[in-house]
Image (spheres, rainbow, N blue to C red):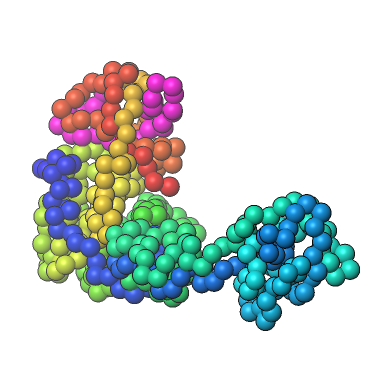
Amino acid sequence: MLSVSQALERILSHVRPLEPRSHPLSQTLGLVLAQEVVAREAHPPFDNSAVDGFAVRSAEVAEGTWLDLVGSIPAGSVPEFELGPGQAAAIMTGAMLCPGADACAMVEDSERQAGRVRFTRRVRPGENVRRQGEHLQPGQVVLRPGHRLRPADLGLAASLGYPELACIPRARVTIVSTGSELVPPGQPLGPGQIRDSNSYALEAQVRACGGEPVRLGPVVDDRDALEQALRQALEQAEVLVTSAGVSVGEHDHVRDLIAKLGGELSFWQIKMRPGKPLAFGLAGSIPMFGLPGNPVSSMVTFELFVRPALEVMMGRFPGESRKQTARLTHEITKKTGLTTFLRCRLESTGTGLLATATGDQGSHLLRSMVEADALAVLPEELERLEAGHEVEVLPLHP
């Protein structure tokens, strides 16, 4: 069996970033950019007012000064007059500055009366004027490949005239849950049945890390039915994730069928708890993950192995930034030889983080994940960890 670190290293050695493609700008949030975003023109493209107020010749404006109003400049228009001595023009925020003006006075610092305006304070040259190109000059690179796009980035790209951007796409992940005992939510339970929770949790986990989930199933423990479902999944997937059917039970067909469909397994057990029976392999270029059937095991192995693989495929770097340290609030005993991932709640104190287990750690108890905000990593060689022992913790994503 591989250790957790060996398994992750092997998985990441088999995945590569997806080929970039063009996306409509509105659909690029969270994607990794695969092109330079360059200013195509000066920004702002013209001198304009930063306030609602009056375009003026600053040398003429002092406290108590009266000037004649000669026009109004709304945003989006081009002024057809030049400001002469003793004159001012009403101007809106973002409107083009008229010739002859070198500053804008705020409407709050003025009093308007019968075609004239009086000012209550002096105005400095250039005050409240946004100069052409003061933000960006033509040819200036503002975003580079490898940057993960945020809301402000999309706004900037739009302001520079980009209707679409080349990005690494979201990984399309097909999810197949297996088990004759599974029924979808909303349907009544028959004798010996349980509801399918894994595919919904996995779908949410894929979506939370930026992937595009396609949920199939549940599929009964019938070899022919499962083979048909896996064939369908491989036709549309960039990543295949199955839940259950990878252990050594009489009805665990997933590993055999993956081989039959041209897939090659790299490993199928890891020295960890929960989540020991995890399979990984490739069908052509498609990474395949066979996750355990217990709900907690399924979610934990996704966080530890599937999420990092998806991050690499989507152009990100899985990493050390998630790791923190915390001190256990109580003694823990565990089986040696297995790295154990303890569902825990974190509490911040003046001396660092504290980690407290979320009750019973059975791999079938999904509530232990609901109440957890992190996984505490308990090393495989240890059997007993005392209260106060410092451990690595991996915060869980929302």
Q: Is residue 3 above or below residue 219?
A: above
Q: Can you say whether 246 is above or below 228 in the image?
A: above
Residue 398 vertical placement versus 152 (above, below): above
Q: Is residue 186 visible in the rendered structure shown here? A: yes
Residue 92 shown left or right of residue 372 in the figure: right
Give the residue furthest to the bottom: 80
Residue 193 visible in the picture = no
Where residue 258 appears, as percent x and y from the top left, is 16, 64
The image shows residue 209, relative to residue 173, as above or below, that is: above
Q: Is residue 251 left or right of residue 206?
A: left
When asked about the image quadrant of residue 5, the answer is top left
Residue 160, percent across and down? 45, 71
Q: Quadrant of residue 14?
A: bottom left
| Residue 349 belongs to magenta span | yes
For residue 33: magenta? no
Query: Residue visible at 12% across and 58% down?
Result: 265
Image quadrant where residue 352 sits = top left
Residue at horizontal 30 percent and vertical 47 percent from the top: 303
Magenta part of the chain: 333-356
Which residue is nearer to you in this view: 35 or 174? 35
Viewer-nearest residue: 270 or 10: 10
Horizontally, is 155 left or right of 23 in the view? right
Residue 187 picture location, percent across and down: 48, 60
Residue 105 left/right relative to 34: right
Q: Nearer the viewer, residue 273 or 33?
A: 33
Camera-side residue of 205 and 333: 205
Q: Provide residue 263's location: percent of width, then percent of height.
A: 13, 65
Q: Quadrant of the N terminus?
A: top left
Question: Magenta segment, principal secondary structure?
Answer: strand
